[in-house]
Amino acid sequence: MLTRGPRGDRGSASLELAFVAPVLLLVVFVGVQAGLWAYGRSVALQSAREGVSQLRLLSDAQSVEAARPLVSAHVVQFATTVGRESLLRPAVTSRSLVDATGEPRVEVTVTGSVISLVPGLHLTTTQRATGAVEHFGADR
């Protein structure tokens, strides 16, 4: 005849699983949420780099100012296309500046909301890219 353990241990595995399963699910959801946030952050950074690569080809401040709305619209389209649902409502700001050596630079900032698995949790990311304005001249 088979012998069973003491009657006091009956159902202990179910009770242990009832405590361990929610913690395990929480760890999985936190990992997935961290991955979504990192991907949204990456999309925002790549979108800002895309805007800088367009603005830095313009040689003077007037050209940069004139092209800014078009470049901003392109950056928003890029972020929406690449990010799909991972970067929501991207907003773009750009500016021209001069560094300490007197060289002109452009800066593009992309801000957006990152998709969340938890209702009521609002995560945002802001990424900035800066680049020197290209100078084109004749060969000597």
Image (spheres, helix red, strand yellow):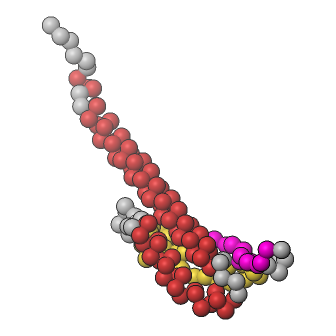
Q: At 59% across and 69% down in the image, what residue appears?
A: 49
> Which sits in the foreground, 102 or 63?
63
Q: Is residue 36 above or below residue 127?
A: above
Residue placed furthest toward the top? 1
Residue placed furthest toward the front? 140
Give the quarter of the figure containing the N terminus.
Answer: top left
Q: At 41% across and 70% down in the image, what residue appears?
A: 81
Q: At 69% across and 89% down in the image, what residue appears?
A: 61
Q: Position of residue 119 (x, y in %)?
A: 35, 66
**Where on the picture, by quarter, is residue 12?**
top left
Give the quarter of the figure containing the C terminus.
Answer: bottom right
* Residue 47 counted in the magenta span: no
Q: Position of residue 76 (x, y in %)?
A: 47, 77
Q: Position of residue 23 (x, y in %)?
A: 38, 46
Q: Position of residue 135 (x, y in %)?
A: 74, 78
Q: Is residue 35 shown left or right of residue 58?
A: left
Total number of numbered discs in the rendering: 0
Q: Is residue 62 shown left or right of residue 67?
A: right
**Where on the picture, by quarter, is residue 5?**
top left
> Which sits in the foreground, 9 or 132?
132
Q: Is residue 119 above or below residue 104?
A: above
> Which sits in the foreground, 42 or 51?
51
Residue 68 seen: yes
Magenta-drawn segment: 127-139
Q: Is residue 57 shown left or right of residue 42?
A: right
> Which sits in the foreground, 59 or 75?
59
Residue placed furthest toward the left? 1
Q: Is residue 71 shown left or right of residue 30?
A: right
* Residue 137 counted in the magenta span: yes
Residue 30 seen: no
